[in-house]
Amino acid sequence: MKLYIVPTPIGNLEDITLRAIRILKEVDIILAEDTRKSGILLKHLDINKKMFAHHMHNEHKTVELISERIANGEKIALITDAGTPGISDPGFLLIRECIAKGIEVECLPGATAFVPALVNSGLPSDTFCFEGFLPQKKGRQTKIKSLIYEPRTMIFYESPHRLVKALEQFIEFFGADRKACVSRELTKMFEENKRGTLQELADYFKSKTVKGEIVIVIEGNKNKHISEEDE
């Protein structure tokens, strides 16, 4: 009895690992964030397995049932639309439930968007903090403000239609001259890694239509930490 966490390509289908293909062929059931999207990948890999939907809208209701099936001897793999499950994607609740029930969880290494974006940025990668998606409305500015004095390189996920707004908010709190890199369409034909100051990036993306998933990597605060009390 085991739950397999299987990363899938974030764009280029060649990025699937041989081990991931083997596991997906061996398991009894594959849990997919979107069975239609995952069906395209599985067809490409010539894998014909039962799939069930496991996404943010139903995971609270299904984790117990799924963990019970694993406990009863079924081998189940969890995949998402792209990348590693649990990283800004469904997965955490099921993993936690399986661990609580003493079920073995095995996470395969593989594709995730923030690692190539971080390395490509040219910003320090020895230490960094991954913030994922910022709150869309309530708490968004509070979250950004809390990172003003963060000394490590910061990584954010963002949607194309909110990219310019996000860059403008970062300018407001981090300063226009803070170095950053915007990566989009990673591993795909039209991959772009645009580097510059936050102001330069904001000006650049204001003048074009942006498509694809976005990763924003921002330089940490190099100044000595100043607490609000000291201010």
Image: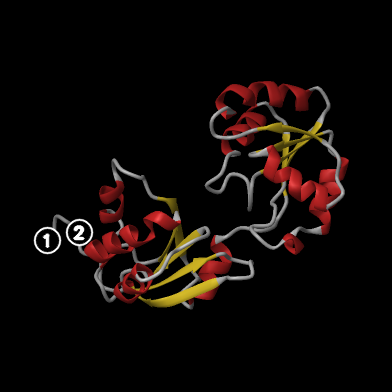
Residue 158 visible somewhere in the drawing: no
Q: Is residue 130 above or below residue 35?
A: below
Which element type, helix, strand or loop, lies under badge 1? loop
Going by the numbered disc 1, the residue's amino acid type is Glu
Q: Which mark is residue 227?
A: 2
Tell whether 41 sits left or right of 175: right
Which residue is located at x 43 percent, y 65 percent?
209
Q: Is residue 156 above or below residue 74?
A: below
Contact? badges 2 and 1 (CB < 8 Å)? yes
Q: Which mark is residue 123?
A: none
Which residue is located at x 67 percent, y 32 percent?
53
At label 2, counting other C-alpha atoms closer than 10 Å, the crowd grade (few under 14, some 14-19, many 20 or more) is few
At label 1, counting other C-alpha atoms closer than 10 Å, the crowd grade (few under 14, some 14-19, many 20 or more) is few
Which element type, helix, strand or loop, lies under badge 2? loop
Tell whether 97 sits left or right of 103: left
Q: Identify the image's colour scheme: rainbow, by chain, secondary structure or one colour.
A: secondary structure
User: Label 2, label 1: how many angstroms apart (C-alpha)?
Assistant: 6 Å
Going by the numbered disc 2, the residue's amino acid type is Ser
Q: Picture quarter containing residue 102?
A: top right
- Residue 29 placement (x, y as % from top left): 79, 33
In the rendered view of the protein, which quadrant contains the N terminus? top right
**Location of mark 1 (residue):** 231
Residue 188 visible somewhere in the drawing: yes
In front of the other: 98 or 83: 83
Q: Picture quarter containing residue 230?
A: bottom left
Which residue is located at x 58 percent, y 27 percent?
58
In the rendered view of the protein, which quadrant contains the C terminus? bottom left
